Image: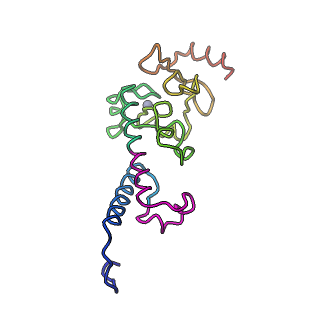
Amino acid sequence: MAFGMLTKPVPLTREQRQAKRAARKNARVDAKFGRVKVRDNASNCAELALSKGVTSDEQIAAEHTAEVKQIRLTRAKVFRRSQFCECCGDSEQETSQKSPKAAHEMHETTPRSLTRGLPPAERFNVRICMRACAICHPLLQRRVLRIDFHNDERRMTGDYDVIDGATGHIIRHMRRGVDRRIALLSTEKYRYISEQRGA
Ligand SMILES: [Zn+2]
């Protein structure tokens, strides 16, 4: 393609070059976060045109930058809140002992697909996001495990239980006022709570 140019290329304006650079950067960030690639030119992209109407490259780049910033900020806050996986209670060291490549990641308890189009602060914040080890993260994504919040306003910042998706039984529970690390329920306590809940 690059070798088959028949006409002399038109030099890009400064704005066009900036927009192209921003789009390339977005594509790299998207690849990193596993999202669909943003095309170099938004006005040529049917998907973007349909979902967002006419939007300039600069606008898309600005929105994207704001979102990346919010993700980074939330991740830092979530990782400060707990040094343990908020699903199983493992430290990073314990996780790495299970698998040398496994690290801790940020999981959104409300999937990104459901919050698309909302302001960054509503998509990524400490209420919605949690620290999850690389072992729990896919289980949460596939809903093999799920989080049951005690308070829908406080969500992850309040108390919650980790539920076995198949049986509905509580596996672990977090009591923010008592525990720094999510606790595995003893068989007795587990049975008692499950009965109380009618699970
Ligand atoms: Zn875990």
In the image, what residue occupies the spot 55% across and 60% down?
A: 53
- The residue under the point 63% across, 28% down is 168
* Residue 24 spot, x, y in % from top left: 35, 60
Residue 112 rendering spot, x and y as whole percentages:
52, 44
- 193 above or below 31? above
In terms of depth relative to the viewer, which is nearer, 186 or 83? 83
Which residues, given as a range, are shown in magenta? 39-68
Q: Nearer the viewer, residue 89 or 99?
A: 89
**Nearest to the observer: residue 170 or residue 119:** 119
- Residue ID at (39%, 25%): 81
Count numbered badges in the picture: 0
Kindly identify the residue that appears in the image at 53 percent across and 66 percent down: 46
- Drawn side of residue 128 relative to residue 199, left or right: left
Asked if the stretch drawn in magenta spans residue 66, the answer is: yes
Q: Nearer the viewer, residue 130 or 137?
A: 130
Screen quadrant of the C terminus: top right
Q: In the image, is residue 105 above or below residue 27?
A: above
Q: Is residue 6 magenta?
A: no
Q: In which quadrant of the rendered image does the N terminus lie?
A: bottom left
**Magenta span: chief secondary structure:** helix
Q: What is the image's colouring?
A: rainbow
Q: Quick check: 191 left or right of 64?
A: right
Residue 183 in the image: x percent, y percent?
Answer: 47, 19
In the displayed structure, 25 sits above or below 90; it is below
Q: Quadrant of ligand 1?
A: top left
Q: Residue furthest bottom?
A: 6
